Image (cartoon, rainbow, N blue to C red):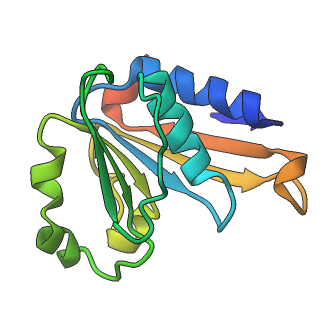
Amino acid sequence: MRTNLPDLAAMEHYGAAIAARLRAGDVVALTGGLGAGKTTLARAILAALGHAGEVPSPTFTIIETYDPPPLRLPVVHADFYRLEHPDELLEIGLDDYRDGAALLAEWPDHVGGFDREAGCLSITLELVGESSAEGRIAIARGGADWVGRMP
């Protein structure tokens, strides 16, 4: 499913649509080049779930967690850009963080991806033109658990 995201307001609306459908155990796998909007979309999802504070990019911390309240469900925001092998997920204890939470995963391909999970919503963000000012396109595909829930 392709969605045009011409500006920040459209990205926020798309994030809200995802947040409204998000469940514990789901993964939102965000791919795209540098500057494609992965963190911006993650921020929009978190804001729609009730987070009012800052959302730092987890590029260096790798994992940031957000808990209820005010969010309606626990969320783990992870950036796997600096990881090189799926075994590193065991070292950082990702399974423990994910227990009962939804996962927003940037650069999932760096750790083998999550496409095999029924609760995975894979979103690829692409710039429409030379810069983000020209907007983006989101290409989404959901696992079996996303049937009937696609944003």
Q: Is residue 150 visible?
A: no
- Give the quadrant of residue 102: top left
Q: Is residue 84 above or below residue 101?
A: below
Q: Which one is in front, 20 or 138?
A: 20
Q: Measured from the top left, where is residue 72 in percent x and y? A: 30, 19
Callout count: 0
Which of the two residues, 84 or 66, is positioned nearer the viewer here? 66
Report the front residue among 112 and 101.
101
Percent from the top left, x then y, of residue 127? 78, 55
Q: Nearer the viewer, residue 65 or 130?
A: 65
Q: Quadrant of the N terminus?
A: top right
Image quarter (top left, top right, bottom left or bottom right) of the C terminus: top right
The residue most toward the front is 53
User: Left or right of 84: which side holds 67?
Assistant: left
Residue at horizontal 41 percent and vertical 61 percent from the top: 58
Relative placement, left or right, of 27 versus 98 is right
Taking the view exactly as shown, the residue that stands out farthest to the bottom is 84
Q: Is residue 32 left or right of residue 73?
A: right
Question: Which residue shows up at 24% across the image and 25% down it?
Answer: 68
- Name the residue rendered at 37%, 25% in the picture: 22
Q: Quadrant of residue 6?
A: top right
Q: Position of residue 107 (x, y in %)?
A: 46, 64
Q: Is residue 120 at least partly visible in the picture? A: yes
Q: State whether residue 129 is above or below residue 145.
A: below
Which residue is depicted at the point 31% across and 28% down? 145
Where's residue 7, x and y in %?
81, 36
